[in-house]
Amino acid sequence: MTQPGDRATKATARQAATVPMDDEAGHWLLDAATGELQLSPKARRICGFPVDGRPDWRSAVARFAREDRRRLMAATRKALASGEIATCDIRRMRPDGEIRRLRVLVMRSPAFGSRQINGVVTEQRPDAPFAGDEAHFDRHRFFGQLAHELYNPLNGIIGFSDLMMRSGLPAGQEERAAAIACAARAMQHHVENVMTVHGEGRLPAAPDMVPVDIACLARDFARRESERASPGAMPIVLGFQQAAGIWARSDAAVVSAILQRLIAITGAAQGSPLLLGLGCVGDRVELTVQDHACRTARQVAELQLALRGDAQCISASDFAMAAAARLAASIQARIAFEATPWPGHMATLSLPALLGAQASAGLRPKMPERVLLAEDDEICRMLIAQYAASCDVILDIAENGAVAVAMVEEAQSLGHPYALVLMDLRMPVMDGFAAARRLRALGHGEAGLPIIAVSANCSEEDVLECRAAGMQDLMPKPFMVEEFESCMVRWLPSMKLSAHHPGI
């Protein structure tokens, strides 16, 4: 006599049979309440488990990539909630180091308990379409569109409100401009943190690891942040005396980006001024950001999990900490977050030190070179023109890539070539990628004509695409006059500071 459980098992088998799978399919059963995992011999062989022993589910998923773990957990939750079959593709590193591409089917059968699920696992061919790749592409396209739609208007709001505050407004109007700028920057920073955590942020594809005077950087950072702060914001107090001469091998832009995030974390709780400290410990330079906030043990634990990349970020502080950790990893730096002996917490950024470095900076001459901006957005053109004027940069403007190519050719024929091209990526008629490829094809080499992308799309994939088109760097929107001047100093010979750094 057939038992009800047998009928349910056969029904589940018929349901699973409707899903295409290889003959080499291994079966598995998981008790979600206890974590006990049972694997058939074929499933053990596919996943690389030994023939004896009983692995738990934690060891089974430990070798999955982070995104694959999330995908598998989502499929499991779907199967538990609906009883339907869920499918996902994952990559698993076997104990011997080989990476296998697997397809996992997850289902819940009435024959098992409410917290038990079963399924099959098959090995994918190397040339088979991988669902994870498609999901990544869709995510990249989504974040790229998000950046384009948000950063362009934020660029105008932040840039012009910043210029307004420099123009000598009455106190009341200056306060309103500062509040607008502060709100826009807060939104910008949160979006950037979310994108960075999800692998779509402004991580440098190749950080510019050069000697950086961390003392000067920290002082300039504190000054800029104080100038941009909204009324009533907590001031940043420098906890060190040395004005210059503390050197590290790093990327100045990435260090500043990390400091912005650490300031946001420690400044999340209103209270006493923030203390920015600096010192050398052994062969490391340590920048510290300290507050006097009273946090619960749970809040501290969540921030430390975010720092290690083990947390599902929920709050703005979690995203800021996870983004700071990701940026620090790109420049071989370390971050720690801990309680202090007195009330408050301290975030520490540790960088490799350069001992005994000296620097001597000369005066910067007036700039004779011309710069061409290719930009279709009128607000962005007006803003960058103001930045160029404040930096004594001669700027010409083209409304799209085709006009930019024609202007470069004409300037070359007249004997007054451009020294630099700032190229927006999304333009009508001819976009920035096509214009850059066209200029390189016409013989304008990288040494003679650097092309810098100016765009809201600034993920690592965007940077690589820009370089493939013949561009050397990317200046992300939104940016302010300091970032513009830094780009000019980096790429225009007449604006470079004369400095000597001894060998490392």
Image (spheres, rainbow, N blue to C red):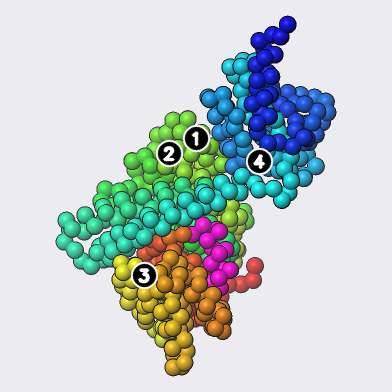
User: Can the viewer see residue 381?
Assistant: yes
- Looking at marks 3 and 4 on the same chain, the residue that comes earlier in the sequence is marked by 4
- Looking at marks 2 and 4 on the same chain, the residue that comes earlier in the sequence is marked by 4
On the image, numbered disc 1 is attached to which residue?
302
- Looking at marks 2 and 3 on the same chain, the residue that comes earlier in the sequence is marked by 2
- Looking at marks 2 and 1 on the same chain, the residue that comes earlier in the sequence is marked by 1
Residue 469, compared with residue 20, is above or below; it is below
Residue 27, compared with residue 455, is above or below; it is above
Report the disc number at residue 315.
2
On the image, numbered disc 4 is attached to which residue?
90
Residue type, mark 2 in image? Ser
Marks 2 and 1 sit apart, C-alpha to C-alpha, by 10 Å
Q: Nearer the viewer, residue 260 or 313?
A: 313
Q: Return the x and y of residue 21 as percentages of the image width and height.
A: 71, 36
Is the residue under label 3 in contact with that under label 2 (CB below 8 Å)? Answer: no
Q: Residues within 10 Å of mark 2 (few under 14, many from 20)?
A: few
Residue 4, compared with residue 459, is above or below; it is above
At 80% from the left and 24% from the top, the residue drawn is 53
Q: Residues within 10 Å of mark 4 (few under 14, many from 20)?
A: many
Q: Quadrant of residue 285?
A: bottom right
Marks 1 and 4 sit apart, C-alpha to C-alpha, by 27 Å
Q: Return the x and y of residue 219 as percentages of the image width and height.
A: 42, 60
What is the residue that sits farthest to the bottom in this orientation? 414
Q: Secondary structure at mark 3?
A: loop
What is the residue that sits farthest to the top in this orientation? 1
Residue type, mark 3 in image? Asp
Q: Secondary structure at mark 2?
A: loop
Residue type, mark 4 in image? Ile
Report the disc number at residue 376.
3
At 74% from the left and 37% from the top, the residue drawn is 22
> What is the chief secondary structure element of the magenta stretch?
helix
What span is in magenta?
Answer: 458-471
